[in-house]
Amino acid sequence: MARLVGTVSRGIRCPIIRENDDVRRIVVDAVLEASKDEEWGFRFHDRDIVAITEAIVARAQGNYATVDDIANDIRNKTGGGTVGVVFPILSRNRFAVCLKGIAKGARKIVLMLSYPGDEVGNKLVEPEEVERKGVDPFRDVLTLEKYRELFGYGVHRFTGVDYIAFYKELIESVGTEAQIIFSNRPETILDYTDTVVACDIHTLQHTKKTLREAGVKTLIGVDEILNAPVDGSGYNEKYGLLGSNKATEDTVKLFPRDAQGLVEDIAAELQEKTGKKIEVMIYGDGGFKDPVGGIWEFADPVVSPFYTKGLEGTPNELKIKYLADSSFGDLSGEDLREAILGEIRKKDGSLVGKMASEGTTPRQLTDLIGSLSDLTSGSGDKGTPVVYIQGYFDNYSTR
């Protein structure tokens, strides 16, 4: 009988992980035990995938930092005077504690927000309202007073927070002067200060380049804050504060570091215990956009910072519906099935540029699998920080 089940993604429940816990042991044991579950169990196959959320890895590493750690790093790197903070995202979880630390390390913060929203789609104001008021977001620089005059005191549609007021109060709560402006051109900040912290995520390098060309005197990116330990703090040498999350009101958990050995060790032990070659990855945010809220759910610097070699590359797939409608439009039933199976079996190593692959998702495997894992594990109380995926690399011809 032909196989009727394709890709399966399972959330695996684990103990609550704390600092210094053995993630390798916990993950391996959880996967092995889950496979034996009387109702939900499964058999192991080659090229199954174990995906581990970055949060439990960073937590086990103790990769945390405080507001004071951030403040000390800012003070050392900027001099602690008037600091421009450019293009932060609007997030209590992702940026609020970081901003508090940056502010504590400066005498004055000039906070420059992009509008009508941030780079991941959180809106300050609806784009139609900006257009209706005759404002050109590509050119116009707005003071806080002008912004309020034009757009009032709106709140985020999901959180109910007025992020402008929230960020201003956060800066002032540590005794730092706050000035807020609105612009979409990085160089605008140089009219207010020549010392800048660039805080965007995926457009960060472009922002830095623009500011350097415009003559900025002192420039650091959010990826350069806590890229080394400060007084024994956590750190991430590659991403700094990028990918950090709020842990407490005065503490952030940073993106995990030095975990390539962990994924390889887990893969090796699972192969020893199951006899199957199982791929392993650590994932953060999935790279997808919410169609209702318009928010791009991707506040980490990458979807997967660490993964085994079998997860490198991009999909190499034929579009079945194209073959059915075009190449074999005159066939049906078993003849159509056999024709499509034949095309899949004979496909060559790369389908790039070929019509039969048009419309297949041209993304990295780790981004696609990480997104699947993120959606499976959720971000709330599911308690499944490990995801076990089967059949991802199979296709319609796989028996």
Image: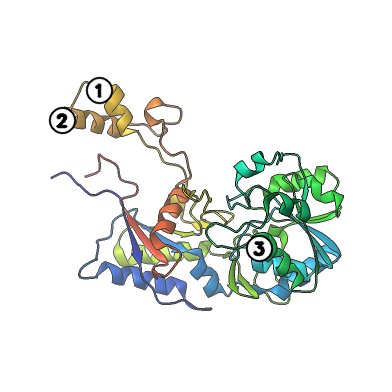
Which is more N-terminal, label 3 or label 2? 3
Label 2 and label 1: CA atoms lie apart by 11 Å
Residue that carries the numbered disc 2 in the rendered image = 333
> On residue 250, which mark appears?
none
Q: Is residue 139 left or right of residue 280?
A: right
Q: Amino acid at mark 3?
A: Leu
Q: Amino acid at mark 2?
A: Gly
Q: Amino acid at mark 1?
A: Gly
Q: Is residue 238 left or right of residue 371?
A: right
Pick whichever, 16 or 229, lies toward us: 16
Q: Residue at x 70, y 73 (%)?
A: 67
Q: Can I make out residue 165 in this image?
A: yes
> On residue 241, which mark appears?
3
Secondary structure of residue under mark 1: loop
Pick whichever, 128 or 282, lies toward us: 128
Q: Is residue 239 left or right of residue 174?
A: left
Q: Where is residue 301, by image quadrant?
A: bottom right
- Hey, which residue is sitting farthest left in the picture? 1
